Image: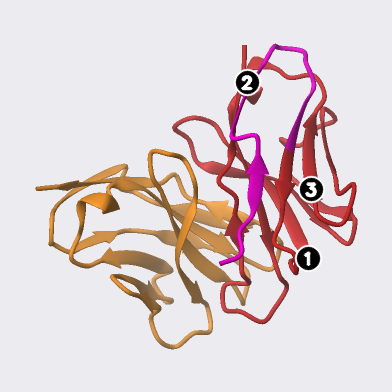
Chain colours: A orange, B red
Amino acid sequence: AQKITQTQPGMFVQEKEAVTLDCTYDTSDQSYGLFWYKQPSSGEMIFLIYQGSYDEQNATEGRYSLNFQKARKSANLVISASQLGDSAMYFCASLGGGNKLTFGTGTQLKVEL
Amino acid sequence: EPEVTQTPSHQVTQMGQEVILRCVPISNHLYFYWYRQILGQKVEFLVSFYNNEISEKSEIFDDQFSVERPDGSNFTLKIRSTKLEDSAMYFCASRITTGTANYGYTFGSGTRLTVV
């Protein structure tokens, strides 16, 4: 079974600053993947970044990077140079030996001027 | 970029009525999913579908729910007799099995179902 914990219900960041959204996971699978999704107020789920458990390097996608610490079972999302359009709900999710994604409860990010 | 298409985007239905939510997955994808998100809560897995049959389902996916792939492109979720607590955003997703780092796991834009 997979479990995802996001301990920050809400975060504020100033425009152009970097922000880290926390995610810890619990899994008994040897091979697994970790995802981050952005959900704006319109409701759709937008894929941001993926990290495989055997990937040696941290994943990066533009302004998004994933700080993967396998021994600590953490997969924090770092957003650099925050923009007003980054204001949204962010979900961490895992995909293990089973078929389904398991999601955390999400972090509501608000970017301020 | 290929996308998963869901219709309708919004649906309002009376309690006890049947609803069918429709999805067109990405054409070369082989796994199909339905997820649900009650307002303000996390996204929850409902069911996965592979090779024309259910491969896994959650405890939420009880007898009032069913899924079908009636032709080569559509993937539907039917709720037989809707209840107030079925009000939620329903997401369809699809993926390939291997070949890309994130398995190509792609979500549709969702159907917001309101039961009144």
Asked if A36 appears above or below A84 in the picture, the reply is below
Q: Secondary structure at mark 2?
A: helix
Residue ID at (33%, 64%)? A77
- Asked if marks 1 and 2 touch (Cβ < 8 Å), the reply is no
Is A65 located above or below residue A55 in the figure? Answer: above
Labels 1 and 2 share a subunit: yes
Residue type for callout 1 = Leu
Kindly identify which residue carries mark 1.
B30
Residue type beneath disc 3: Phe
Residue with the mark numbered 3: B75
Query: As rendered, which of B48 and B77 lies closer to the eye?
Result: B77
Q: Gap in Å between the C-alphas at discs 1 and 2?
A: 30 Å
Q: Residue B16 in magenta?
A: yes
Which residue position is annotated with label 2? B85
Please give the range of residues in magenta: B1-21
Q: Looking at the image, tell me whether mark 1 or mark 2 is earlier in sequence order.
A: 1
Where in the figure is residue A22, as x and y percent of width and height?
Answer: 32, 58
Image: B12 above or below B79: above
* Pointer 1 chain: B
**Residue at (80% x, 21% y) in the render:** B18
- Please tell me which of labels 2 and 3 falls first in the chain: 3
> Is A3 part of what is drawn in magenta?
no
Counting other residues with Cα less than 10 Å from the Cα at mark 3, is it few (<14), some (14-19), or many (20 or more)? many
Q: Nearer the viewer, mark 1 or mark 2?
A: 1
Residue A91 on image: x %, y %: 43, 52
Type of amino acid under label 2: Glu
The subunit letter for the residue under badge 2 reads B
